[in-house]
Amino acid sequence: MSEKNERQLRIVGFLCNWCSYGGADTAGVCRFKQPPLLRIIRIPCTGRMDPLFVVKALAQGADGVLVSGCHPKDCHYAVGNFYARRRLELVKRFLPFVGLDPRRFHYTWVSASEGQRWQEVVTEFSAVIQELGPNPGIGADTPMETAGQAASAFA
Amino acid sequence: MDTLHAHLEALFDDLELVIGWETGYEPLRPTPAFLRSREDLSRLVWNPLCAPNLSVYLPGILKDAKETGKKIGVCLKGCDSRSLGALVQEGFVERERLYVVGLPCPGTVDPEALAEARKSSAPVTHVSFRDGLLAITSRDGTEEIELERVLARRCRRCRHPNPLHADVILGDPVPPRRTEPSFSDVDAVEAMSLEERRAYWEEELSRCLRCYACRNACPLCVCRDRCLAESRTPKWTTQRDGVRDKFLFHMIHALHLAGRCTECGECERVCPVGIPVALFKEKMARIALELWDYQAGTDPAATPPLQTFDPSETGI
Amino acid sequence: MEQAFFLADAELQEALAGLSAQADVWVPASDARKPGLVRFRRFQPGLTVRLDARSLVSAKEVLFPRSETLLRFTKEKDLSVPAGHRIHLDDARTVRPVVVFGCRPCDARGFLTFDPVFTKGPYRDPYYSERREKTTFVSLVCRDADAACFCSAVGSGPADPEGSDAQLIPVDGGYVLRPVTERGAALLEPIGRTAAPEQIREAQDVLDQVGRETVGEGSLTTLAEAFRARFQDPAFWHAHIDKCLSCGLCTFVCPTCYCFTITDEARGLNGERIRSWDACMFPHFTLEASGHNPRPSKVERYRNRVGHKFSYFPARYGQVACCGCGRCVRHCPVSVDIRAVVRDLPAQEEAHA
Amino acid sequence: MRIGVFVCQCGTNIAGTVDTRAVAQRALDYPDVVFATDYMYTCSEPGQQEIQNAIAEHRLQGVVVAACSPRMHEPTFRRAVEKAGLNRYMFEMANIREHVSWIGQDRAANTLKAMELVRMAVEKLRRNEPLFASEVPINKRVLVIGGGVAGIQAALDCADAGLDVVLVEREQSIGGKMAKLDKTFPTIDCSSCILGPKMVDVAQKENITLHAYSEVESVSGYIGNFTVKIRKKATYVDWDACTGCGLCMEKCPSKKTVDRFNEALGVTTAIQIPFPQAIPKKARIQKDACRYFTTGKCKVCQKICPTGAVHYDMEDREVVEEVGAIIVATGYDLFDPAPYGEYGAGRYPDVITGIQFERILSASGPFGGHVKRPSDGKEPKDIVFVACVGSRDKSVDRPYCSGICCMYIAKQAILARDHLPGVNCYVFYMDIRSPGKNYDEFVRRAIEEYGVQYIRGRVGKIYPNGDRMVVQGADTLLGAQVEVEADLVVLATGVESSRGAKELAEKLRISYDQYGFYMESHPKLRPVETNTAGVYLAGACQGPKDIPASVAQGSAAAAKVLALFARDTIATDPQVAGVLESACIGCGKCLSVCPFGAIQWKTLRDGSRKADVLETVCQGCGLCNATCPPKAIQLRHFTDDQILAELDALCA
């Protein structure tokens, strides 16, 4: 690991259950190797994705946030990702204004069959995050969030 | 002023009450007035110090008002009227229950700028406004100050001095200061590096008291007593005083205003510690404009962009 | 004025730096970027100290932080006990001496509302009390009251020494520092040189002159009964309060509002119990677990604020819970004027439609 | 809560690159975890027993299994914990196989990642609450979309079992591609002879409602209760009146109409029954060919029709069918060889596709079963078959094997030799794929008994030489260029997804792969299910298939429907949205975004308006939850607090 990454970098993934979570499974079944940064939170649909999750994750120091759902028009719930893409694009454009690096947030569409594409998405985004290094977040001075305390519970 | 009084006098029998402004504890501070009798109307004032956006009261007052068949009168400036438009769009206000008096607005005063512009600091006894000049009288005499010098930030970028959605417009139309959307203050923030922006907001927000004045003054913050920022279930923020929680509160506010903010600037005006919180929403308004060519509150029949979708949209 | 010291304008920074060696020194100061924004900040060399300006927010947070950790807790996993863990509590704290320098008399006096609640009686609050005991207030005789100020109306005044340990009196070229309490004297001893007789005389003149000024009309200290009579007069309260936005600004800038909430903020096995500012203007303040809220709207909430300050508190502690600083009036987004509300309390015969 | 954590080694699948013991050990440090262990195969019978024992012994109130994907075994483990007395929703999975052990080799990094995923699952589980399914009645009718052999089989199986079946066919007749085939491999039995009776069965079953020349417009609802709108396209012939006598076809003056059933090798009339065995055997007017529709004069058919069935003013009409399950059997289409410009398909009349040759071979085909070439009607002396046209070729975005071409080439070569014993048959191929029962033997027969000459190599170019075609290619076994002169060239065009497959998938809310074939739930274990409950797949819509496989899938899909319908009610997924009324501000944003109309207004006694979720209609997408400003509406099991807890477990 490069000098930048004194701590383990983490990408939070929000994946819809029907397409992208399946795509990540497909990538696994096909043994498509991926960097180990990503931690996936399963959500039913990208329509569940409140843009505030993105902001909160980045504010509290997630090094990257990756949201992936069904391709537009393929939503299991018909229209969830149509709403999602408006919200996600909006927050993507908003992040830099408040000093959060928009490169740390990526949203995309990967179907359950696209194991290889999933591998590419994860690999490319992981490389971006490796390059950017640790995310300082916002207001890291908040008490209780000190490294020592967190470490004892979550190391 | 006289027109306003006369107009409302003539109509008063058909009105439950009129929401306007009256002189507050000093003439520099007009305060919202709920005028319930004909005599009350004499208290009504209208000048560039009438800063509060009265549309903030509409959802509540309509909910509580008895169905008497009488309308509720409300005085709205240009920017206030956009807020009304957005409230109508979202179904919080039944437009037909209102009698909207639109007041073309020359711009409102930034109190801090006014204090600086005044030579005297003595208590003000009288204020009047004519031809772009504020006449401010105190025991030290009367000073004339150009409104343009002491304009609030929100008014410098105003495109809608002339009210929309009004039943009647009283006063001559005011030429807008801007014909195109202006985001120069947003640009100024964006001119900073990413790192500087983060530091800038961390410093600004560190002052936040979480008094929620910005939220409560916002006409589009319709959650009122149920605001997510104070909710413990779900729990998005803690009660800590750190920047992170303050930041999260302001992000909740900003994202909830995304595609809805009518840029009235009340959030920023009321902040006791001078945080330019309206910039968050101005940025949101700009994104809504860029992505969906959408300006909240201008078309009462439109659907806010995050409440709908377009399958053919590309590029996002 | 038996004993007094003189501090030249030019020596202010140095004196504050000296004080800072032994205490946290809080002064009204402004940001370079926002000269109009004056608030209390911890002194550090180079800070723009603004004794000339009223601070936007009171000095309340010095003794009563916006949020403070009361204790920290850790759950140590131990499967041999029924809960599966043992709880360790840690409420260790260090309290440094504090000097509030250059506040206005009203700011200092504000803590006289805190004191009986937090330091006396059956529930002495150790967190506040420990800090309070180590705090010294040096207030500046106030010569720039504005239209929102009303200290005289609550039994105080612009030169009121009550609540202050020492007074700063502006004189030609600097300030005369006048000890009010022994603690004040002890604080001033090392930083000032003894004032010259003419400086003392000038200071006395200022004190006398300012002392004669009346800031705010009438008296708001004897309206406890009038409040009770008005309690159930919805028209009265609506007439005054319909415009209120029910935000917490008035209480948060107020030097005497001391309400707080206590929450546990935990993550995993660790957490802390914190106390943070709360406001009777917030709906959650009185929200009951059942979902019932005895103060469901801003009318009841604002009524409580008035009642607390001018009726309930005086009934219990013999003084109004208001120092007349005027911040709630000055900063209110819609200029709600508590003075007007309180003044109107007795006017029973007046009809409110 | 007392939580037990079970870390699966999955043999070496997980344990190979994750220290499962360490993961279990670390889990004991997490809040509320009172028991943690690793196990060889947690999903096995003894593995599940281990969980059940631990629940009893340690009085567990919730269980986390760190193993494979929840899309695989979540139902298995939910049942297991339920058997031990827990609510089935007091269970979470951490996917440490597909998302960890199978995608990384770094044991340390994998182990850390697995620990964190377990930690996230624990934090989520701590905020779970028991959920209880409600039961909704099942409408025991089934919709079958597509009347090819797979759809026919599915429809008949369901109908035989007593179900009401609605069969929707886009074309004028059912039968699909199989109805166009002459013979079938490897038995050389007559396609229409074996399919015909099944088609007749469909027509005769009283419990099958056939909507031919109809398309699915929209699908709403959910498993057990779908509402399907079907557009019955205008045929201009009243099929209730039409007897299929064919008189109109005899008299129709528009005799130059392209015969699509015969793959444009022949002509037909504007009013027509596509082929003699058509089901339903009803006439239809092809509007663009009809003299009346194009010139406004004619009406011959209307005058001649003995039952007065012709109505020129007929319009499309919509019918609504309520069903409880849907079988999708929309089949496939054949690759259009136009991208292979060097082969000249379309340009040279004697370069034809496999399905065209099938029609030439057919006794009911354009040439009455005489093998003639389209250009001049001469009998060919040399026929070249080109395999893999639109199969196994990335350059035309068809990298997959169509699976049937090798076999149908062999069949067609044999049949050609049967029809014209003197004809020479050549086959250019890449590999011969013949893995079915008696398939390889069949190909060998073509080579050995019928003397078909197989040349291993690709064809580079086909060009005319006089009235013959020259096929230029490589023989990779000889390592030489070869040129073969032929009278007729048959391109074995590959299988691709059916036209309109994606649009239909969007209506059905099922997934499809990049080529438009529908995605099954699991490639091995759930081959006919989709990820949309109540929607099943049969036949080539899921991927290229031959007839036996399509028929088998048709029956399999029918069996799935019958299993579903064996119960009277279905338990709805309780992972749906719920409203905290005290927090609801009545803004109605959730109502406006809900894709299912699952939220309605409810008026409380105080007159206030609150959102109210219809739990059996809610599909659990969570769009309302993301939209609600005060977060009064929460998706159970995916609440804000749960997602935030997962987030906090990772970083805070």
Image (tube, coloured by chain):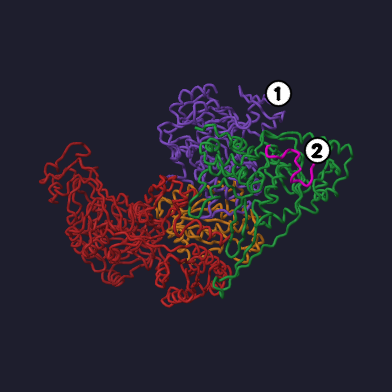
Chain colours: A orange, B purple, C green, D red
Chain letter behind tag 1: B
Q: Which residue is rendered at x = 62% and y = 36% of the image?
A: C339
Residue B295 in the image: x percent, y percent? 50, 37
Q: Viewed as shown, does residue C273 lie left or right of C155?
A: left
Instruction: Tell me: residue C128, above or below residue D125.
Output: above
Residue linked to disc 1: B141
Residue linked to disc 2: C170
Instruction: Tell me: residue D420, above or below residue B30.
Output: below
Label 1 crowding class (10 Å Cα cut-off): few <14, some 14-19, many 20+?
few
Tell me the magenta residue range: C153-168
Q: Which residue is rendered at x = 70% and y = 39% of the image?
A: C155
Q: Which amino acid does label 1 sit on?
A: Gly
Instruction: Tell me: residue B137, above or below residue B185.
Output: above
Helix, strand or loop at label 1? It is: strand
Decide whether residue C156 is among the magenta residues. yes
Gap between marks 1 and 2 measured at Cα: 27 Å
In the rendered image, the residue lying farthest to the left is: D306
| Main secondary structure found in the magenta portion | loop
